[in-house]
Amino acid sequence: MTIDEAARELARMYHQGIAVREQALSVHLFGIKFATQLDGMPLKVLAARAEIPVTHATEIKKGMNLARYVEIRKA
């Protein structure tokens, strides 16, 4: 996954979360879902390219750290 592909997916997930006011949750889920692909990517640059607040780079990292402990399930 390239940084541009990741940015598009992050933006999509982030803006999907706006409808239900779950932006931070969407960013965490993004980090969990794509943890291995995101490893080594500059997360602040990724957030900037997704046109979301750069401070969400921390939230992406939290999701990446959680990835080894959680499993995504369908609601």
Image: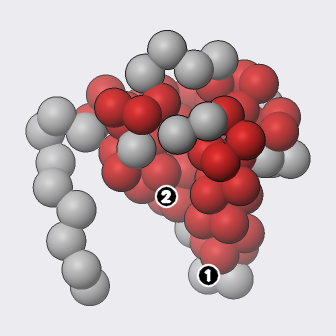
* Disc 1, SS: loop
Expressed as whole percent of the image width and height from the top left, the position of residue 50 reads 78, 47
Is the residue 10 above or below the residue 68 in the image? Answer: below
Residue 39 position by quadrant: top left
Assess disc 1: are there few (<14), some (14-19) or many (≥20) residues with their C-alpha within 10 Å of its C-alpha: few
Q: Which residue is mark 1?
A: 20
Which residue is under mark 2?
A: 25
Find out whether the residues at labels 2 and 1 contact each other: C-beta distance under 8 Å: no
Asked where in the image residue 34 lies, by quadrant, the reply is top left
Q: Is residue 14 left or right of residue 61?
A: right
Q: Amino acid at mark 2?
A: Leu
Q: Work out whether 50 lies above or below 40.
A: below
How far separated are the C-alphas under marks 2 and 1?
10 Å
Q: Is residue 34 placed above or below 10 in the rendered structure?
A: above
Q: Identify the residue shown where x is 64% and y is 17%.
A: 42
State which tag comes first along the sequence, 2 or 1.
1
Residue 17 at x, y percent in the picture: 62, 71
- Residue 14 shows in this picture: no
